[in-house]
Image (spheres, grey):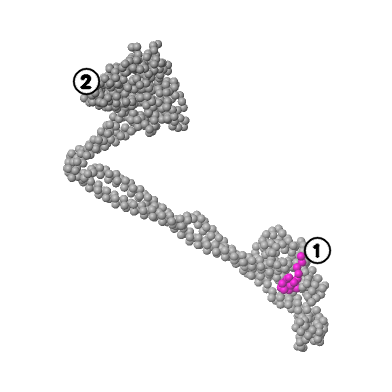
Amino acid sequence: MILKRLVLNNFRQFKGRTVIDFSPIDGKHVTFVYASNGVGKTTLLSSIVWCLYGGDKLEYIDQKSLFLNKSLFQELSDFGEMTIEATLIFEDREKQYTVKRTIVIQNVDNKQKITDQNLEVQINNETQYNPQDRINSVLSPAMKEYFFFEGEGVQKFADESNYKKVQDGIKNIMKIDTREKALSYIESARSKFAKELKEINAEQGNADILPEEEKELLIEKQKDIKHNIEKLNKDIETFDDIIKKIEINLLSIEEIKILSKERESLLQDIEKAKEKRKNLQAQQKDKIAKEAYLALSNDVLTISKNIIDEKRETGILPVGIRKKFVEELINSHMCICGTTFDSGDKHHNKLLNIIESVSDESAIEDILNELSYFIEAKKDITSKYSLEYKTLSDELTNTNEKLNSLEQKFSTLEDNIEDEFPQNEENLISRKKQTINDRDNSIKTKERFSIELEEIEKKLKEIETLINKYETQNEAINLVRDRIAFCSEAVEVLSKENAKIIEQIRCDLSKKINDKFQTILHAQKNAKIDDDFRLIITEGDNENISGKSGGEGQLISLLFISTLIDMARNREKERNTSDIDPGAGIYPIVIDAPYGKFDTVYKQYISEVVRDMAPQVIILLTQEQWNDGKDLYPIFKDDIAHQYVLIAHRPKLSHSFSKTNRINYNGQSIDMEILDDDEYTEIKNMKDI
Amino acid sequence: MNLLSSKRLKKAKDKDIVFEILDIKKNKKTGFFHKMTEIYAFAVALGIKSKKTEPIIGGNGDPIAVDLFSEEQQRYFDTVILFHEAGDITKLNKENEENINRYVKTIEAYANGGLAIIKDKLVVHPEDSFNIITRLVHEELKEVIPDEAKGAFEW
């Protein structure tokens, strides 16, 4: 789509017939329109949009309902009418479109009232029957904001809340919307067929829900339940395994318990044997400590006995009153005659005399007698000692052997117990209980699913029968069903493909925008379209810094449009003529006051982008923004096809010959405001001045 | 009047170690004799069996009162005197101071002789005291014990 000419008739400020050409000349594609504020720049933008899309209100400007030039309106009598006209000639895909929109304004109570509107579209001089559709198919109304910008509105795409605009722009310009429209048509068709089928079924007394749909649902449900049953079977199997393992462990605990009891008993036996050994050893020690000296003295005892016996036999041993006997009588106060006495009486003194006369030999005899008894008592001491010691030794040996054997048994038992020491019994029992519980629950759930499955299978059989019945009953139903099935399949395929294409475009677009952004700014910043289709600027560690700079926001918005147009242009080049691909292949840009209050550097950045963003660029700006071309001319000089200036005719000047209402061109100073009785705007091609 | 009962039997100072090893009150690990009198009587028996007397010369350890010896041990000492004095029963007269002194010295000499034998054996491996003493006894007895008891006395 390339704009060639705009013709306005009595359109707001523009009195009478106003013509403005935009056609590129010799590859030069930029048109500049200079005007002071309020003179008609935005009206030009608004007139183009209105011409294309119509409406009772004008866009971008204040006093949206004023279509007719003010001075002409004032001349209108009450209920007088006048026709306003906007004609736009453009070319698209080698066809020339002439769009002529007229509106009739009537003076009603000094207000402009629309009484009639008309649109005529000719393509290659042939009048079209559906004129608005023809225009919309080239550039849909939804797309106007991507190509016709007003002032700072150019920044809008960088606003994160406008991600939908970014997404829609991609879809429309890259022709995805055509696909989406197709998708929507197919969905509508499917609904229509489904409705049709319901009606047929209703006529035949069939159920509301399609048996095929119900069958699908049931099969889906059947699949889910089978999957669940399979999972439950695995769970039950796992639970059984766990229970088995626990039971084995518990069994081994029982075995270990028996072994432990055996071990306890062995320990007791060992303790007893050790005690016995200790006793025997103590007895042996005692025997040695107390009796060994006598056992060793067998000879001494025997010889002593022989000596005593020999002395007795030979009568060498003294005989008489034994001293001890007399001593005992004195101690018991009894005389030999049997009389009891007191100390110092005659019986006592007599006994004292006797004791003095009793010889020592009698005391020796006493000793020898006692020795005789002693030796007699100990005569077999050595044998006795030896035999008793032998008995103790034998017992000790047996006890030691027994102890060894017990300790060996104990050690073997201990090894077995250690090797197979199972987990804590209480834990195992509680785990077993829990696992049995889980298994039972799984079995119950499985049973419930099985019943449900049986019911589904039963229903499926019934539905199958129903479907068979329908199939034979009515071929029309089959046909509608086939159509529904086709639509469903087409919807699925198209949806997937659309999503894939959009994602691919988003990635390509994002990369290209970033490349251009970095080329222009040379900064450590990145511009991208994120997964949510937000147009953002990041810095450093992917930190989103969008919105911090108005200049960058405007830049990235322009880059988005320019890259999108660029991609569309490339796509157009590769287009196959047989493609179902309505709409424009290339797009113009009409941009009103794009520079805002940016400094020279940003103006230059933006200018570079604007210059290259479309095959046709129309820039509307004030003389201040143009600034005698100091900043912008060097950038655009090779691309300027037309330059227009809007001259305000007014009864009273607003700027009185100051520099602000003049523009310099080729060394001439052009007044942009002229004193006149009428108030209107005149457009002049600067070449003609 | 029994003059012996008030006497004390001396032991040589250098033999104190035997008591320290064998008296359970002094060493629970190596000792197994519950009284010093038992060690003393055992030493006397060993001395007489080995015909080894060793008079106590020079310093002596704490002597043991005769009263502390059991009646049986005292009877045994009488047989030792009878044996030593080759049947001279007058040497058993305990009212005679001279006799008693001789009696005491004889017992002390045998005890000291026996203690010398024990000391020789014990000092190397005191920890093996029980086996050393047992072996000492059984070596002495092996010729006189009955056949049925011999198993316990073979080493």
Nearest to the observer: residue B129 or residue A65: A65
Q: Nearer the viewer, residue A133 or A677?
A: A677
Q: Is residue B74 magenta?
A: yes
The chain under label 1 reads B
**Segment colored magenta:** B62-80
* Residue A318: in magenta span: no
Tag 2: amino acid:
Glu
Q: State which mark lies toward you, 2 or 1.
A: 2
Against A194, is A448 above or below? below
Label 2, secondary structure: give it: strand
- In which quarter of the view is residue B26 placed? bottom right
* Residue A126: mark in rendering: 2
- Residue B134's x, y, as percent? 67, 64
Which quadrant: the N terminus of chain A?
top left
Disc 2/disc 1 C-alpha distance (Å) = 162 Å
Prevailing SS of the magenta stretch? helix
Q: Quadrant of the C terminus of chain A?
A: top left
Which element is circle 1 on?
loop
| Residue sitting at x 41%, y 56% | A433
Q: Amino acid at mark 1?
A: Ile
Left or right of A661, for residue A8: left
Closer-to-camera residue (A507/A55): A55
Q: Answer with the quarter of the image where residue A629 lies.
A: top left
Say which mark, if any, is on residue A426: none
Q: Say how many tags the image has.
A: 2
Which residue is at a point 68% across and 72% down the rendered structure image?
A381
Q: Mark 2, residues whose alpha carbon is within 10 Å: few (<14), some, or many (≥20)? A: few
> What residue does disc 1 label?
B57
Q: Against A456, is A484 above or below?
A: above
